[in-house]
Image: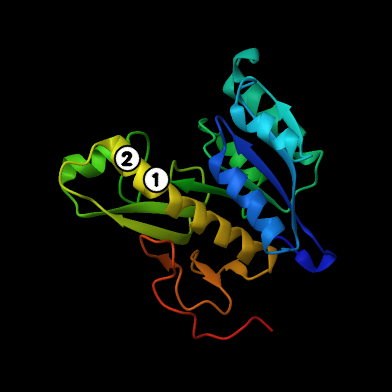
C-alpha cells in the first residue's frame, strides 16, 4: 500500500480511448478538494481522445503506441519507465485495453487498480455486457479491483450494480452502467487519497470507516456508512 503520510496522493491514469472515467476522477479531485493529483495520463493510442482532454486541463500526457514495440514485454518495459518518471502512489487503469505482463503487474503490486464492467468474478475478459445478457442474469455491474497477474481478478475494492431490462442490447447495458462506473471509481479514488484502503492478511480489501462498498443504480452507496470517520 502507498504511504500517504508524505502528502498528496499521486496518480497516473492509463487510457486507450476517450477516458470518461479519467475525466470524472479529475473533476472529482477538483470538486471535492481531494489530497490527490493526476500527474499524467498515458495511452497506448496516440489518437486517444482522452489525451487531448487531459491537455486542456493542464495534465501531462504521453502516447506510447504499442504497435511501435516488437513484443508485449518491450511495450510494458517502456510503459513502466514512463509511469515511474512521475513517482505515482497508484496507477489507475481506466479503459486501458491492453493485457499487462506478470512482470509489469508485479512491479506495481498493491498500487495498480482497474475498473471492469461486470460483477467480478463473473464475466472476466471482453464482451461482458453480452455475456450477462446471454446468461439471463437480472443484475449487472462494475468492479474496481487491484490488478493481479490473473486477468480481471484481484482484491475487490468496490462494486456497483444496475438492473437488466427486457430488450436490452449490450450497448443499452453499457450506457446504463457508465454513470455508476464513474461514481464508483471516483469514490475509490477519494478513499485512496484519504489513505483508507488496505489489503489484509487474507488478501481481501478493507476500507477504514466505510460500512459498505456496494453502490446502487443511482451511484449511491447501498448503506450509509456507520463505521465512523477515519481517525
Quarter-of-image position of residue 53: top right
Q: Is residue 89 visible?
A: yes
Q: Is residue 22 left or right of residue 174?
A: right
Q: Residue at x 68, y 23 (%)?
A: 64
Q: Which mark is residue 117?
A: 1
Position of 159 with respect to 148 (left or right) is: left
* Of the pair 159 and 168, the residue shown nearer to us: 168
Mark 2 element type: helix
Q: Is residue 34 above or below residue 11?
A: below
> Do the residues bearing badges 2 and 1 touch, measured as CB atoms within 8 Å?
yes
Q: Using the numbered discs, state the Cα–Cα distance from disc 2 to disc 1 in whole angstroms.
A: 6 Å
The answer to whether 42 is drawn above or below residue 132 in the figure is above
Classify the position of the C terminus by image quarter. bottom right
User: At which x and y percent is residue 104?
Assistant: 63, 37
Q: Which of pointers 2 and 1 lies earlier in the amino acid sequence?
A: 1
Badge 1 element: loop
Residue at coordinates 62% horizontally, 51% vertically from top-left? Answer: 25
Q: Please provide percent x and percent y for residue 136.
A: 15, 47
Residue 153 appears anywhere in the view: no
Identify the residue shown where x is 56% and y is 60%: 188
Q: Which residue is mark 2?
A: 128
In what quadrant of the picture does the N terminus appear?
A: bottom right
Q: Nearer the viewer, residue 71 or 130?
A: 130
Q: Position of residue 211 (x, y in %)?
A: 47, 78
At x 70%, y 37%, the residue is: 54
**In terms of depth relative to the viewer, which is nearer, 198 or 19?**
19
Q: Depth check: give the residue in front, 23 or 95.
A: 23
How many residues crowd around disc 2 within 10 Å: few (fewer than 14), some, or many (20 or more)? many
Displayed quadrant of residue 228: bottom right
Amino acid at each position: 500500500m502507498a504511504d500517504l503520510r508524505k502528502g498528496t496522493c499521486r496518480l497516473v491514469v492509463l487510457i486507450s480511448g476517450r477516458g470518461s472515467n479519467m475525466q470524472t476522477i479529475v473533476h472529482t479531485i477538483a470538486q471535492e478538494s481531494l489530497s490527490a493529483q493526476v500527474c499524467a495520463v498515458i495511452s497506448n493510442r496516440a489518437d486517444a481522445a482522452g489525451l487531448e482532454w487531459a491537455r486542456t486541463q493542464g495534465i501531462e500526457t504521453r502516447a506510447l503506441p504499442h504497435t511501435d514495440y516488437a513484443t508485449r514485454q518491450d511495450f510494458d518495459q517502456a510503459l513502466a519507465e514512463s509511469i515511474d518518471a512521475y513517482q505515482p502512489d497508484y496507477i489507475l487503469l481506466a479503459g486501458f485495453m491492453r493485457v499487462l505482463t506478470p512482470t509489469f503487474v508485479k512491479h506495481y503490486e498493491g498500487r495498480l487498480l482497474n475498473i471492469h464492467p461486470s460483477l467480478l468474478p463473473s464475466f472476466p475478459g471482453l464482451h461482458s455486457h453480452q455475456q450477462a445478457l446471454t446468461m439471463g442474469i437480472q443484475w449487472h455491474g462494475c468492479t474496481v479491483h487491484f490488478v493481479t497477474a490473473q486477468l480481471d481478478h484481484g482484491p475487490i475494492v468496490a462494486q456497483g450494480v444496475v438492473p437488466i431490462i427486457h430488450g436490452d442490447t449490450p450497448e443499452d447495458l453499457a450506457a446504463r452502467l457508465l454513470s455508476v462506473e464513474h461514481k464508483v471509481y471516483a469514490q475509490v479514488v477519494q478513499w485512496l487519497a484519504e489513505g483508507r484502503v488496505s489489503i489484509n492478511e487474507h488478501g481481501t480489501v478493507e476500507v477504514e470507516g466505510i460500512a459498505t462498498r456496494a453502490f446502487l443504480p443511482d451511484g449511491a452507496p447501498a448503506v450509509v456508512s456507520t463505521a465512523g470517520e477515519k481517525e
